[in-house]
Amino acid sequence: MNIWDTLILSPMINALLFIYTLLFQNFGLAIIVFTALIRLITLPLTYQQMKSTMVMQEIQKSDAYKKMQKKHKDDRQKQSEAQMKLFKEKGYNPFSGCLGLIIQFPIIIGLYQAIIRTLAQTPVQLFDLTKFMYAVIPAEIIPLNSQFLYMDLGQPERLYLPALVGTPLEFLNGVIPLLTILVVITTWANSKLTQPASTEGQGAMMGQMMSLYMPLLLGYFAYTLAAGLALYFFVSNLLGILQGYLMRRTREANAAE
Amino acid sequence: MARKQFTLRKPLLIIGVLILAAVVMSACGSGSVLQGSSWPGMTLEDGILYVANEEFVYAISEENGSEIWRYPEESERNTTFFAPPAIASEDLIIVGSYDTKTYALQPTGRFAAVLWTFEAEEERERDRIIGGPVVDEDTVYIPGSNWNLYARNLEDGGPGPWTKPFRGEEAFWSAPLIVGERIYASSLDQHLYALELDSGRMIWSKDLGGAITDTPTLAGKALLSGTFAQSLFALNLESGNEMWSFQADGGIWGSPAVSDSMAFFGDDAGFAYALDFTSGSLLWKEQLEGPVRASPIVIDEVVYFVTEFGAVQALETSTGNPLWPGVNTIDGRLLSDPIASEGGLLIGAMESDCLIFILDYESGFSRCFFATEE
């Protein structure tokens, strides 16, 4: 095993398996709890990232910012300098949000790999999985029960609705990728909370592109890859939205006081 | 001008990162979940080695390693083979696919034609064929990953002698074993099942406490079967009652090999074991160079083990002493069951430039026997 496997992947796989053994060998519940735990561990990072976004949004809405933009509208260099000065005055560091994202990235990749590896679908994948397992994890739990609600978490999710046949939705052949739709919607909502609300310039363009492409990208993954991964995306988005909502309410309450 | 360039570059960077993420995650995901990969499945019959590996099934001359035919002619998307083929005759080869179909192939020169295919009606998307089918007279028995064991008509793939498939509680990943009027099937649901061959009715089942990935081995009046839970069991062939069990150091993946009254097996902790299969007592135990997935094979009082790290080790059956000085290694992961041939031991390899190696029994030297064009 390499350093990545030893330090990131193996602990994650075993944590996931340990939670699975505690939660009645229900892998769907294990993914939900594990995702919540990971979000809890990375809370300081996501908190900083969201706070940074909200401060940025507040700055952009402020009169001082609008005045500054109007004053230097013909000189990008001076506008940029004035903007940095304003950021400094408000205690906003443009890179503080990025740092959180960068540190989260290996955790997200590790979590993704952990879910994929524990959902071993072929003998060689199962053989590889057992080498990651710590001795305290009972071998009897293998293979994992991948059924959760109507889904097989090891296969792409599809909700079969024979009742659709004979309705205007007949073209769907009685199948709806429900989790994919939920992933797209929640990713879009989450990105709206975490992207700065720039109204013009490259910031606005970047924000719009992220809000457009991220839901499509994760929607594509949710549609084509294992349902276990789509479940992770969905739960992670929901928790992100909840966190954003609570933080926003707290800031608004503090501002009102 | 400078401002425009800067404006364009950032969004392009984001798109680039997103595309990269898509490629990385799709690559990790599709290989793992949708298409799958595993070690080659091999069967030797009447001078022809049949190999199911990734997109192709090959028929290879045992004499010189030349390709006789392959199926399909060109690689087909989402079709992956790794279940050992079953040979009904030289003109009828049954092979299961990870794409959920079982194919009946008839060689036609350098390629093969499909005579029929069988696809489960129930839970089709889960029915990836991983264990090898088994042919008995005019019936083919197909272990399914959708928890069903099927008996189908060999001639056209239509319904066989059973009114319905036998259903376990997890996937069947190994070829069943036919002994007399019974068929024995091991399942990931941790049970070994004994069924009536002509009806599929269950005679007995035994919970072994760990998933079973390989075919049970017939040892006198006992069936030997190893589990993930690191135990080897001997069950009475008639009743399914436990005769003895043996606790190993690691998970047991492959079927034991038997010779005289001895049983040999390896585990994923990298140990080789020899037991007296009448009592279950340990005769010897040796540390090997790497975890063992494959079943060992006994030839002329020598038992051959292959390991994941590419080691091929020949041990004397009576003592466990190595036949050759040092350890012979092959470049690749050796997870397939080795097969004895006239010219030497045939060894399938994963993650290697050569698909099949041949190893000289006496000297232990190996060379590439068959490599794919890819």
Image: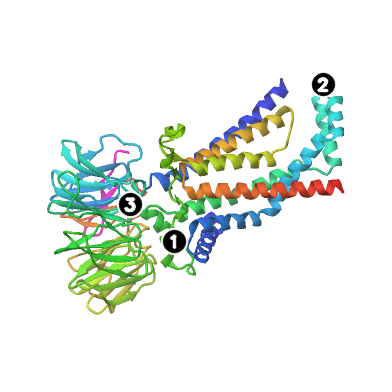
- Mark 2 vs mark 1: same chain? yes
- Residue at the spot of label 1: A131
Residue B298 x, y percent position in the rendering = 21, 65
Give the spatial CA distance, label 3 vs label 2. Answer: 66 Å
Q: Residues within 10 Å of mark 3 (few under 14, many from 20)?
A: many
Residue B140 x, y percent position in the rendering = 19, 52
Give the spatial CA distance, label 3 vs label 1. Answer: 17 Å
Magenta-tinted stretch: B354-374
Of A15 and A30, which appears nearest the observer?
A30
- Count how many numbered circles sit on residues in the image: 3
Q: Chain of mark 2?
A: A
Amino acid type of the residue tagged 3 in the rendering: Trp
Q: Secondary structure at mark 3?
A: loop
Of B326 and B298, which appears nearest the observer?
B298
> Which mark, residue A160?
none
Q: Earlier in the sequence, mark 2 or mark 1?
A: 2
> Which mark, residue B39?
3
- Mark 3 vs mark 2: same chain? no
Whether residue A2 is visible: no
- Residue at the spot x=59%, y=52% of the render? A107
Amino acid type of the residue tagged 1 in the rendering: Lys
Residue B83 x, y percent position in the rendering = 28, 51
Of A173 and B281, which appears nearest the observer?
A173
Residue B224 vs residue A49: left or right?
left
Whether residue A11 is visible: yes
Residue A107 vs residue B195: left or right?
right
- Residue at the spot of label 2: A74
Give the spatial CA distance, label 2 vs label 1. Answer: 63 Å
Q: Label 1 near label 3: C-beta < 8 Å?
A: no
Amino acid type of the residue tagged 2 in the rendering: Asp
Report if residue A203 lies within the magenta region.
no
